Amino acid sequence: MIEVSVIIPVLNEGGHIHATLDELSRRIAAPHEVLVVYDRDDDTTVPVVQERMARDERLALVKNTIARGPSGALRSGFAAAQGSKILVVMADGCDDLSQLDAMLRMVPGQADIVAPSRYCPGGAQLIEQTSWIKKSIPRAAGWLLRAFTGIPTYDPTNSFKLYSARVVKELPLVSTVSFSVTLEAVVKAHCLGYGIIEIPTVWKDRRHGKSHFKLGRSILVYFPWFCLALLRGRFLRLPHRWFAAWFGVRSASASVAAPAPEPVMEEAV
């Protein structure tokens, strides 16, 4: 039985995928599968993964048939996943995979979603060649969202997350642009009362290649989910059952009865 499904959305990551797959193999002891989700057949990642699939039955390629881009890729991966836990990581080595063992122990006993955060105490974002605006806007958006809605993470747009599969399978996800599905999933889980735990993480910028993240477009597609979260916020707080009826899901019950304690770690320098 597969316990963990790892989803990696890719776009021409042939030069990075080997290192990421090697580290995942070292870090995950539980029975798992790794789903590499791609948009186009000429993606440079595809032949690299095909070569590895011949000697690793846990590895599979999934064609994104929903919408080109990371949101469509993640939704395609969610649909194909067979594990009871679903982990999303990036192919470019930016995520701290040394945290995986601790994260996997938290779901489902402590949380329905584990959200590593660059912006909470102990977290850090190691970016050198990025503008001040690109560094500051995601941080400010995360703080505002938490302040006004009570979502228990300062970094809801970080794609590096671990989900209980039942949550992802239940949520009616519709996002198709940029990484907006990540915020959509967190906001809808918050509205339905699922347990979310934030842990600090150190995020590293890619060493090679070019990021395809577009900040301006992302802000526009994130905004509707910010507005939705306000309906389960600090000033207006609609009942979970209303959202369950709105989203068309069976229930709004969470598996976690109480929030986890705040992580105690040193402030990153």
Image: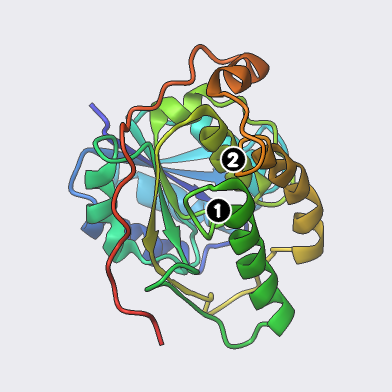
Residue 250's place in the image compared with 89, above or below, is above
x and y percent of residue 51 in the render? 41, 51
What residue appears at the point 37 percent right and 73 percent down from the top-left corner?
A: 122
x and y percent of residue 198 in the render? 40, 55
The reply, left or right, for residue 191 in relation to residue 161 is right
Q: Nearer the viewer, residue 255 or 34?
A: 255
The reply, left or right, for residue 7 in relation to residue 10 is left
Q: Which mark is residue 177?
A: none
Picture quarter with the C terminus = bottom left
Q: Is residue 197 visible?
A: yes
Tell me if label 1 and label 2 are in contact, CB under 8 Å: yes
Q: Earlier in the sequence, mark 1 or mark 2?
A: 1
Picture quarter with the N terminus = top left
SS at mark 1 in the image: loop
Q: Which mark is residue 187?
A: 2
What residue appears at the point 47 percent right and 69 percent down from the top-left corner?
A: 94
Q: Amino acid at mark 1?
A: Pro
Q: Residues within 10 Å of mark 1 (few under 14, many from 20)?
A: many
